[in-house]
Image (tube, rainbow, N blue to C red):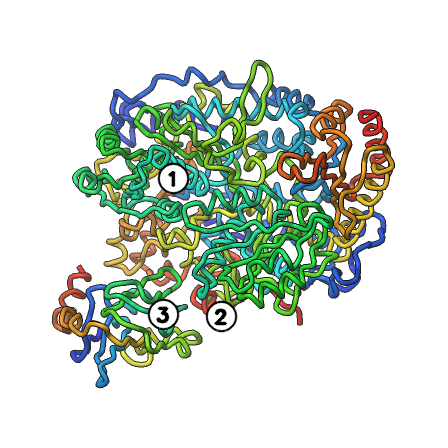
Amino acid sequence: MPFIPHTESDVREMLAAIGAPSIDALFEEIPAALRIKSLAGIPEALTEMEIGRLMQQRAARDGKPLNFLGAGAYEHHIPAAVWAIVTRGEFYSAYTPYQAEASQGTLQLLYEYQSMMASLTGMQVSNASLYDGASALAEACLMAVRAHRKSRSARILVPANLNPTYLDVARAITEGQNLKFDVLPYEAAGGTLTATSLDAYRGQDITAVVVQQPNFFGLLEDVDAIADWAAANNALLIAVVNPLSLALLKPPGEWGTKGADIVVGDGQPFGVPLSSGGPYFGFMTTRMEHVRQMPGRIIGRTVDLDGKPGFTLTLQAREQHIRRSKATSNICTNQGLLVTAATIHMSLLGAAGLEKVAAASQTQTSALVAALTRIKGVKLAFGGPRFHEAVLQLDREPGAVLEALAQRGIVGGYDLSRQYPELGNALLVCATETRTDEDIAQYARALAEVTK
Amino acid sequence: MQVMKVMQEPLIFTHSRAGRSAAGQYPHAAVCEVPEKFRRKQPAQLPEVSELQAVRHFTRLSQLNFSIDTHFYPLGSCTMKYNPRACNQFAMLPELLGRHPLAPESASQGFLACMFELQEMLKEVTGMKGVSLTPMAGAQGEFAGVAMMRAYHRARGDLERTEIIVPDAAHGTNPATATMCGCTVVEIPSLPNGDVDVEALKQALGPRTAGIMLTNPSTLGVFERRIQEVAKLVHEAGGLLYYDGANLNAILGKVRPGDMGFDVIHMNLHKTFSTPHGGGGPGSGAVGVGQRLLPFLPIPVVGREGERYRWLDARDIPQTIGRLSAFMGNAGVLLRAYVYMRMLGRTGMQRVAEYAALNANYMLARLQQAGFEPAYPGRRASHEFIITLKRQAKQLNVNAMDFAKRLLDYGFHAPTTYFPLLVPECLLIEPTETEAKEELDGFIEAMVAIQREAEQDPAKVKGAPYTLPVRRLDDVRAAKQLDLTYHRG
Amino acid sequence: MSSIPSNLKYLDSHEWARVESDGTVTVGISDHAQGALGDLVFVEVPEVGRALSKGGAAAVVESVKAASDVYSPVSGEVIANNSDALSATPELVNSDPYGQGWLFKVKPSNAGELGSLLDAKAYEKVVEEAGH
């Protein structure tokens, strides 16, 4: 029997100890009318060999296209050591570290992770992760409402050039809690926010302002000015960031004179494969003054009975298993295994290595933009400084172009035309350090062909 | 007694030396084009270590953990069963790892086929009409479930229905979720025999009832015998029934939530379908719904048209409660669950509940024979059961936490302690079907030995553990003198 | 046996109230309550100026394993709180629940409410019953 070790004599002895005539008798408390005989709709079991063959066939069917798509999930090199360690059973098959003495490995790693994320974002404290970047933003909005006691409006300003899925998720998750999201337009020519769009809200009760750096179009926002606007208008500032970009860019803790209040994002660029969208992990860092409003698990360093240093879950009284209906969030698990990957990844690369990855991604994106805009009918939408994504405008609908590229083994980008009709036939493209000059040339040749 | 090698590993930052690196991991040098005003001035405080130092550090950290692969881990309500390695390997085929979540459907048919078939299999084992795989954890599945219940009432113009009934034995996430969805919680008691108090339920039901959240078998380790009556009462009052799938392992292939009358269910794929717990995640909390809630499923869902699979989004499901994740949830976890279900197959799935119940009832019987007190005597255990140590606490001043910590010295992960809250000094024990009889016997012997120690030398038990990397930690200091990050110097 | 001063009034949810000579009411949690919670690690008190209603959640006391709401024994406006002392040393609630561990002071808007509070004898019964 797959995964079940019992021999016939085991079963006999165990039933005798129970005093039950059969295994079936163990289910006698279930009303007979409800019992089912079999699961007709489930296929018969496959052996490991058979399921292996099936999965390889399915995987091969999708192949390995050359990827120029980002939009919130980025293909980076993952050092071989990362997943070799992550999949060790002691990390892979452990659970939430409720028994701290038997979980010091996971707990210490999470403390190291919190330290790295706090430093990277320029904030004082980090939690041990949330589900993903989008849900982390939702939690940040709820947290801002709790943390900003003076604001009564629960009104959150959200830029139109925020990843649109993040806003969808924030709306869905906060739906029962009466938050109001006001969408801030971006400046049409530059693709970034300006003080003018914010000034419409001057003097009003705003709980928080959200800004994404780099924004969904890959462009760099003038975050110092936005942070100062938020501070001057008594609104908290929620920063949504790509953690890799922070190897190059000013950390949110240093934006403007006061810095951001809550920083969130998706940790996927750190050692987590694309894997169809998950599991990734969301991160959240904040100022010490808001720590009790922060959702999710938090690890603290303390000492044991003998005075020896050790690590434990702390501030648990905020959490669902104690506060129940008054908890800061219903969140229970974090994304521990992915945080394990990210912590190993950050340790291997260090600040210098991450900076090189970020700079190489930026350089390759510039090379990609240069190569593609040489093609007739393709132009760059926004000229301002960017990280590793860019908006291109085509002379025809992006959907059909992307489909034709897919036939040639290229995932060519993200079709912006449905969510941003004002941009016309716009396509969001991305290159990371994993795209070589030859990859870029191949994309350019294919795009020239399909738009001929 | 199994003695774990006592060891400690310094923080990775203490291995750090300026200029040291794992240079083989970098790309070739590139010029940074970021204008000065956007630039970072000081590098982040990340470690500067060699590849070997990093590998050794994290390998050593891993060795400080208990895990399923190294220890019996009978953590009640968490279903810590073996995570087959094949599930990991086949979910990590290079093409599957490299697939971008927004890749065109034409280049995703293999992946989508797995997801569609997973949806179909989950419908079959739960008796529901539709499944969405997108919730990223049990708590998110719960959120989706309650949000769908709310959306259903609202779509009918029934705006007053905002009360969620929750038994006192429920997981803490249930009331937390109800609050998160803007509902109020009405708690009802359990009877001394572990069943829901139907009289109290009748009192609680009314025109404001949105629904009830139930776990069945309950967190008390017993099957809710009057479930049909409960379902009838709730439906007659205009409410819906939510099934918390935390304990689905107990009934897999024996009885289905859909047949019991539930309208919506979340499944913890990391429990019942054996995807790894990963030190606290990732989980996966797929939701299933009956006919009435089909229009409200969270998106995206995988649909099939002829031989082609495609994503269904808000254009297909206009009344959806929306998106809960940036893409489609924890796809890699879902692939592991898919492989597991295919390897179990039709009969293998029924064996899960059978042997989980056999192991739990065997342990309960043996512990009872050894003098331990079951919280619900005379009831069959589901896949887990509760013993209460209130006698030991009173007579010997040795409580459930002391037993739990001493078990660690004997090489067993502790059961769940102090949950459910309504049973004093409780241990909630869930062996799962993948443990062999010898392992269960070893645990029972350890419990008997600890009982003897508690009688002869209670201080010894109260001081445990002794053989782990640390002894009991000062939680008060941890919460008062917050030390949440390392600072150099 | 926990201490229950006879000059105070109580709620059955374990808050105490002391009517001061100027008519204001000082509020804290009882010795029994602090003992049941264990070492406190955090106390959240209401801001000065906040309007409270009798029986409404006003403060939160938190130990490592539990967090409890503290209910106001009377309606009225918060005129002072003890956050200066308690934010650094929440353990004052453990060591001196009726003195330095006070939580907040209220200017009652309805003095009649004071009559419905428990006296020490009645509260002692509540504590005894909780012990069973």
| Residue A414 in picture, x, y percent from top left | 69, 36
Q: Do discs 2 and 3 share a chain? A: no
Find residue B146 and name its label.
Answer: 1
Chain that bears disc 1? B
Q: Residues within 10 Å of mark 1 (few under 14, many from 20)?
A: many
The quarter in which the C terminus of chain B is drawn is: bottom right
Chain that bears disc 3? C
Q: Residues within 10 Å of mark 3 (few under 14, many from 20)?
A: many
Closer to the camera in the image, B419 or B374: B419
At mark 2, the secondary structure is: loop
**Depicted B305 relative to depicted B467: above or below:** above
Q: Which residue is mark 2?
A: B481
Which residue is at 79% across, 48% downward?
A383
Q: Is residue A164 left or right of residue B168?
A: right
At mark 3, the secondary structure is: loop
Chain that bears disc 2? B
Q: Which residue is mark 3?
A: C46
Q: Is residue C120 left or right of residue B79?
A: left
